[in-house]
Image (cartoon, rainbow, N blue to C red):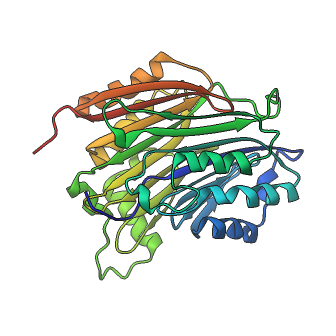
Amino acid sequence: MALSGFEGFEKRLELHFFGDDFQLGLRKIEFESIKLVLEQVQCTVVSAVGNAYFDAYVLSESSLFVYPTKIIIKTCGTTQLLKSIPPLIFFSSLVGFTLSSCRYTRGTFIFPNSQPFPHTSFKDEVSYLEHTIPSNLSFRKASIMPSISSQNHSWHVFTATIPHHHHHHQLNNQLFTMEVCMTDLDPILARKFFRRPDDEKTGHSAGKDMTELTGIDEINPNALICDFAFDPCGYSMNGMDGDWYSTIHVTPEDGFSYASFECVASVNASNIGHVLRKVVQIFRPGTMSVSTTCSGYSDEMWKQMASAVEPLGFKCRSFAMDQFPAAGTVVFQTFSPRRKST
């Protein structure tokens, strides 16, 4: 393991708001204001696309999604994600919206000592959140969901919401969020996310090539993909399929290789096993965690995750479940190959 390198593990923040305009809502926040928010985080927009439901931004460090009543932002490296909260609350108020719930999640950093405040520890992050979000979001919970098999894949969760405020933010019983974190990528597959020194392509053009070369475009053939390749290596993409998003981020360097996949889908979707299987085939990680979040609990869905990757030689090594306000049920599973190749 390298002593220092680029931190692939993302920090993820999901904020829900309430207001009167549910057609455009938060999408009315001006782009200049979004850039000011990202300045606080220390990242920039490299590509953007929108449809009838939401706007998606590929960032220099991961992704941002803006819906009429919610904002999802995830950033990697040494970004200071939680510093986006005060300006997001302010700019949302200018378009008539008020924060009603907050969810923060992340895995275990590969290089924790390189993280700036407030990401120096989960204790510091929780303390910062407690003092930054409005006091009326008083129904709060923070927890570290452990992995029995690997200390490097614990799942950190903080949620907060306004008590008895469910009429403003109804949890959708039919949808769930899946977050996949993968380390120790197959080095041959990881090489596909390196650019040739003399390719003379734009980040957009090189990103499109990587999307097709790796089969990422086959994960969801219906999705509109906005992709970007970094120089000399690295890759990000956002997918849009109606009001559902997906996103992939890749740090391919040997010694600290990492890839993530996130999507939202229906709990009744029959293809979620195919999606997870395809993602695993693209990266062939040495270790993988899958976190699923939804308002209801279904044994079948979590079993589906394990059965999807079993034929690829992966075994579920640990399973943890917990309940969180403003999130519902969070299930955290870790996987690794039954036999690691020598």
Is residue 275 at least partly visible in the picture?
no
Measuring from the top left, give residue 204's x and y in whole percent.
47, 70
Pick the residue in front: 12 or 284. Answer: 12
Measuring from the top left, give residue 171's x and y in whole percent.
69, 29
Measuring from the top left, give residue 106's x and y in whole percent.
50, 45
Pick the residue in front: 237 or 145. Answer: 145
Residue that sits furthest to the top in the current view: 299
Q: Is residue 85 above or below residue 336?
A: below
Q: Is residue 3 above or below residue 299?
A: below
Pick the residue in front: 139 or 211. Answer: 139
> With 178 as the anchor, is 214 left or right in this view?
left
Q: Quadrant of the C terminus?
A: top left
- Residue at image point 24% right, 34% down: 312
> With 234 as the anchor, is 247 left or right in this view?
right
Image mark count? 0
- Residue at image point 27% right, 51% down: 185
Pick the residue in front: 189 or 71. Answer: 71
Q: Is residue 138 above or below residue 112?
A: above
Measuring from the top left, give residue 222's x and y in whole percent.
51, 45
- Residue at image point 43% right, 46% down: 108
Q: Quadrant of the N terminus?
A: bottom left
Residue that sits furthest to the left in the current view: 342
Q: Is residue 185 above or below residue 60?
A: above
- Residue at image point 52% right, 42% down: 263
Is residue 124 at least partly visible in the picture?
yes
> With 230 as the anchor, is 29 left or right in this view?
right
